[in-house]
């Protein structure tokens, strides 16, 4: 930003500012650069990273994050979510989303065996759920059952291909590439 302003000042000293002596292109380029720099200047000066204030004007103190405390907070939040989904499953055992979310929590807390059970239940309730097959593959990958990983990724890929879901097809391709690198 500062170098752009210095360039603009040097251009004015070299008589680029004189419209009559320069061609129109130089004139337009000069004022385009000047306009862009003026637009960027307020965000550069008043950005949150430079002022220590958030967008609402509240001061953000410099704090050191305690990693152990952060891990405890995450673990407590995940345990609360786990208990919440278990209660919801008891009330409505045929809702595949509750099983899916519970499986996600188990994956997050590194309990792949329990995640497998949850995602298998999702597939039993909703066999064409490609995301459940994908998550199930992730759970099998945590226990190094590569044949099941590939089987569920193949099923998920076909489901996503049928649904024209390129995002999830790409995620599967990336997952398979990572598996090949590990082998």
Image: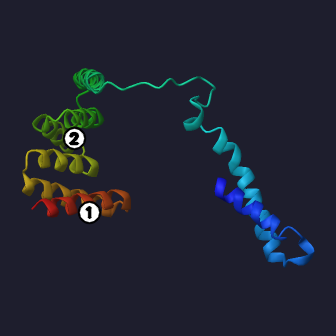
In this view, 114 is above or below 169: above
**Can you say whether 29 is above or below 127 in the image?**
below
* Residue occupied by mark 2: 122
Residue depicted at x 13% and y 58%:
151
Residue 149 lies in quadrant: bottom left
- Residue 6 image point, x, y percent: 71, 58
- Residue 90 image offset from top left, x and y in percent: 22, 22
Badge 2 crowding class, 10 Å Cα cut-off, few under 14, some 14 to 19, many 20 or more, is many
Q: Quadrant of residue 111?
A: top left
Q: Kindly tell me whether residue 127 is visible in this rendering.
A: no
In the picture, the disc for residue 173 is 1
Q: Which of marks 2 and 1 is in front?
A: 1
Please report the residue visible at 60 percent of the width from the left and 32 percent of the height from the top: 51
Q: Tag 1 or tag 2, which sits nearer the N-term?
A: 2
Position of 131 with respect to 39 (left or right) is: left
Label number found at residue 27: none
* Residue 35 in the image, given as x and y percentages of width and height: 77, 57
Q: Give the quadrant of residue 84.
A: top left
Element carrying mark 1? helix
Judged from this view, the residue extending furthest toward the right is 20
SS class of the residue under badge 2? Answer: helix
Q: Label 2 to label 1, Cα distance in Å?
A: 23 Å
Quadrant for the C terminus, please: bottom left
Q: Where is residue 141 in the image (x, y as percent from the top left)?
A: 13, 49
């Amino acid at each position: 930003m500062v170098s752009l302003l210095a360039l603009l000042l040097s251009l004015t000293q070299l008589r680029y500012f004189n419209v009559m002596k320069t061609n129109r292109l130089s004139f337009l380029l000069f004022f385009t650069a000047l306009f862009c720099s003026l637009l960027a200047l307020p965000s550069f000066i008043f950005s949150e990273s430079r002022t220590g204030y958030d967008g609402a004007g509240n001061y953000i103190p410099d704090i050191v994050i305690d990693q152990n405390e952060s891990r405890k907070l995450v673990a407590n939040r995940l345990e609360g979510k786990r208990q919440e989904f278990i209660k919801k499953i008891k009330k409505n055992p045929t809702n595949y989303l509750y099983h899916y979310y519970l499986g996600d929590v188990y994956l997050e807390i590194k309990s792949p065996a329990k995640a497998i059970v949850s995602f298998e239940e999702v597939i039993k309730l909703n066999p064409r759920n490609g995301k459940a097959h994908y998550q199930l593959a992730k759970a099998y990958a945590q226990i190094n059952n590569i044949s099941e990983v590939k089987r569920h990724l193949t099923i998920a890929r076909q489901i996503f291909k049928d649904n024209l879901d390129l995002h999830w097809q790409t995620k599967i391709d990336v997952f398979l590439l990572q598996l090949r690198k590990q082998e």
